[in-house]
Amino acid sequence: MADSLSIKDNRTGKSLDFPIQDGSIQAMDLREFKKSSDDFGLLSYDPSYMNTASCKSKITYIDGDKGILRYRGYPIEELAEKRNYLEVAYLLLNGELPSKSEYEEWSHNITYHTMVHENTKQFLEGFRYDAHPMGMLVSSIAALSTFYHDAKNIFDEHSRKLQIYRLIGKTPTLAAYLYRHSQGLPYIYPNNDLYYTEDFLTMMWKPPANTSYKPDPVLVKALDTLFILHADHEQNASASAMRGVGSTHADPYSCAAAATAALYGPLHGGANEEVLRMLEEIGSKEKIPETIRQVKEKKKLLMGFGHRVYKNYDPRARIVKKIADQVFEITGKNRLLDIALELERIALSDDYFISKHLYPNVDFYSGIIYQAMGFPEDIFTVLFAIPRMSGWLAQWNEMLQDPEQKIARPRQLYVGYPERHVP
Ligand code: CMC
């Protein structure tokens, strides 16, 4: 039979044929293989979900071998060149790019949900001056659920839309507020006359007494393009956290807080901050061979290198490098750039890295750009969370409407003690 898989269980001699659909078999089919009638049936063992598809999705396509990334079918390179972040967020959530009137309505709705409750300021005051911005972001996104009780109506389409506007609209405001809290600066309210990314940069940097402050349009455009590159990346750790918590029917703020927490880790979104620390620790080109030696001895990881899915190159990294040139024309070159370029050059010509398919990922150069723009290192991952919010919400929205999805509940292989008795 074409498009099927035949499996024989040599314990019992039983053979079965299973259909292959979309390049996969149904894991539940394996349960048909039992040693005896009271046997639970065969499980597949897949630590870290290396080869398990947990959902069907129409949002993001990645071909890791060819280095392809598409949102809703559109190549990331074309979206980065021709569209702005809010259009791309609309695309991720709605499946199509917006018409002019759809865009106007969408950007109006996001813009008019950028204000946060005044209580948020008191909430932020509770954090010490040196609290990590990601810790503050996780908590303040979770805290939004205490303001919006209607968010529990997750099967009401109107309510879902409202929470989506709120989460995409308020995340930059929270990000700017928590930064200004850590700096002891007064908060700047969002301005409904400004485009999303310009508004964010204004809330971040505007001196309180300078009414004419305007961020440089080249930097606004650069950050907006970085937002597009970071908007979604299919079933990574944070999207899986979003879907996993969402599968319990928790409200979207609680789900997004869980996703933000997953992003915080240095193997995921936290890598952009770690790349900068690593480059600063290396300090000069002469010290690069020593770093490479330690990486090969497995004493450290080369942060910003490697990816679970991309085994050729990360297409986002290529675009980020171009953005870096545009930003450095305005800000002056980041002193760490030469170290990064040399590290990349050496790593890409070294058999160790070639044989393990280790290439720069999106985080390798993004931190250097953020630093040149004036962002402190510990806020880099927050700059990843702001645009990823639209991707997380698209994943959540899709999951809630997927009749095949149930509460996420993996199985385990119990390898502990058999029954024993308390002495
Ligand atoms: N530096 C040195 N060696 C590495 C690295 C690295 N960055 N990444 C992987 N390896 C080695 C690893 O030691 C292993 O070697 P061996 O075969 O001898 O055991 C081999 O390459 C395969 O690695 P893996 O850990 O099995 O790969 P994975 O798919 O589980 O991990 C990863 C992917 C991204 C977590 C990993 O490459 C890593 O830790 N990179 C550094 C952190 C980083 O830059 N993360 C950002 C990812 S992109 C942004 C995002 O989407 O979050």
Image (cartoon, rainbow, N blue to C red):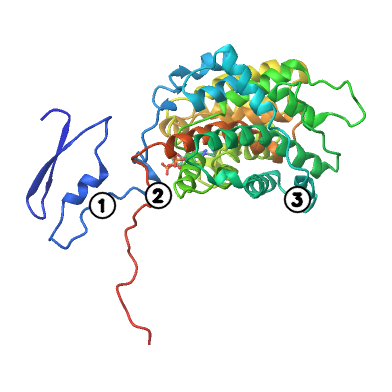
Front tag of 3 and 1: 3
Q: How crowded is mark 2: few (under 14 residues within 10 Å), some or many (20 or more)?
A: few
Sequence-wise first label, 2 or 1: 1
The residue under the point 88% across, 20% down is 212
Residue depicted at 86% across the width and 39% down the height: 186
Specify the amino acid type for callout 1.
Leu
SS at badge 3: helix
Q: How far apart are marks 2 and 1 (CA)?
A: 18 Å
Location of residue 73 (image quadrant): top left
Q: Can residue 264 be seen in this view?
A: yes
Q: In which quarter of the image is the C terminus?
A: bottom left
Q: Residue at x 93, y 29 (%)?
A: 209
Location of residue 169 in the rendering, given as x and y in whole percent from the top left corner = 66, 32
Q: How far apart are marks 3 and 2 (CA)?
A: 32 Å
Q: According to the image, label 3 marks what residue?
A: 123
**Structural crowding at the residue carrying mark 3, measured as other residues with C-alpha within 10 Å and reported as few (<14), some (14–19) or many (≥20):** few
Question: Which label's residue is closer to the chain start, 3 or 1?
Answer: 1
* Disc 2 and disc 1 in contact, CB within 8 angstroms: no
Answer whether residue 279 is visible to the viewer in this image. Answer: no
- Residue 43 shows which numbered tag? 1
Q: In this view, does 214 lie above or below 303?
A: above
- Which dot marks residue 407? 2
Amino acid type at circle 2 is Ile
Q: In this view, does 107 lie to the left or right of 375?
A: left
C-beta proximity under 8 Å, tags 3 and 1 = no
Most extreme residue toward the right is: 209
- Point out the tag, 3 or 2, that comes first from the N-terminus: 3
Foreground mark, 2 or 1? 2
